[in-house]
């Protein structure tokens, strides 16, 4: 599986290819991808969009009462394979 950053950039590129303007933000534990969705998005394009975001670890759609719609997706960053990843007080 590609690195999380590569996956996130690939998702953003695919959304852009569909015609959405994707924004990518790095966070401590994940990378988020967001795109505004126009009201006039055809059903066939929605299918493509769903195929893209299904590759993320989580995704959703935020719709406001003012008619705005923001598609979001999250790609989790890799957890270190060594060391104490459970936090203090949980060591064996």
Image (tube, rainbow, N blue to C red):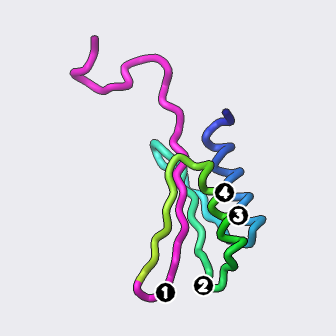
Q: Which residues are magenta?
A: 65-92
Structural crowding at the residue carrying mark 4, measured as other residues with C-alpha within 10 Å and reported as few (<14), some (14–19) or many (≥20): few
Distance in Å between CA atoms under marks 4 and 1: 24 Å
Q: Mark 4 or 2 closer to N-term?
A: 2
Q: Is residue 62 above or below residue 26?
A: below
Q: Secondary structure at mark 3?
A: helix
* Residue 77 sits inside the magenta stretch: yes
In contact (CB < 8 Å): disc 3 and disc 4: yes
Q: Is residue 90 above or below residue 11?
A: above
Left or right: 16 as drawn, with respect to 75? right
| Residue located farthest toward the bottom when viewing the structure as drawn | 66
Q: Main secondary structure of the magenta part?
A: loop
Identify the residue at horizontal 46%, vertical 44% (top origin). Answer: 28
Q: Report the mark closest to the observer, 4 or 1.
A: 4
Please name whichever residue, 35 or 50, is drawn nearer the observer in this view of the structure.
50
Which residue position holds label 1? 67
Which residue position holds label 3? 48
Which residue position holds label 4? 51
Q: Dividing the picture into quarters, in which one does residue 35 lie?
A: bottom right
| Residue located farthest toward the right when viewing the structure as drawn | 17
Which residue position holds label 2? 39
Q: Is residue 50 above or below residue 36?
A: above
In contact (CB < 8 Å): disc 4 and disc 2: no
Q: In this figure, what is the number of numbered marks?
A: 4
Please name whichever residue, 51 or 38, is drawn nearer the observer in this view of the structure.
51
Distance in Å between CA atoms under marks 3 and 1: 22 Å
Q: Secondary structure at mark 2?
A: loop
Q: Position of residue 48 (x, y in %)?
A: 70, 63
Q: Position of residue 38 (x, y in %)?
A: 62, 81
Identify the residue at horizontal 66%, vertical 45% (top origin). Answer: 7
Structural crowding at the residue carrying mark 1, measured as other residues with C-alpha within 10 Å and reported as few (<14), some (14–19) or many (≥20): few
Distance in Å between CA atoms under marks 1 and 2: 8 Å
């Amino acid at each position: 599986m590609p690195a999380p950053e590569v996956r996130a950039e690939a998702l953003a590129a695919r959304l852009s290819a569909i015609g959405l303007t994707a924004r990518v933000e790095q966070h401590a534990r994940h990378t988020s991808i967001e795109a505004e969705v126009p009201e006039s998005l055809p059903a066939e394009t929605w299918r493509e969009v769903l195929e893209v975001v299904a590759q993320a670890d989580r995704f959703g759609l935020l719709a406001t009462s003012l008619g705005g719609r923001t598609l979001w997706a999250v790609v989790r960053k890799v957890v270190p394979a060594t060391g104490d990843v459970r936090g203090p007080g949980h060591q064996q």
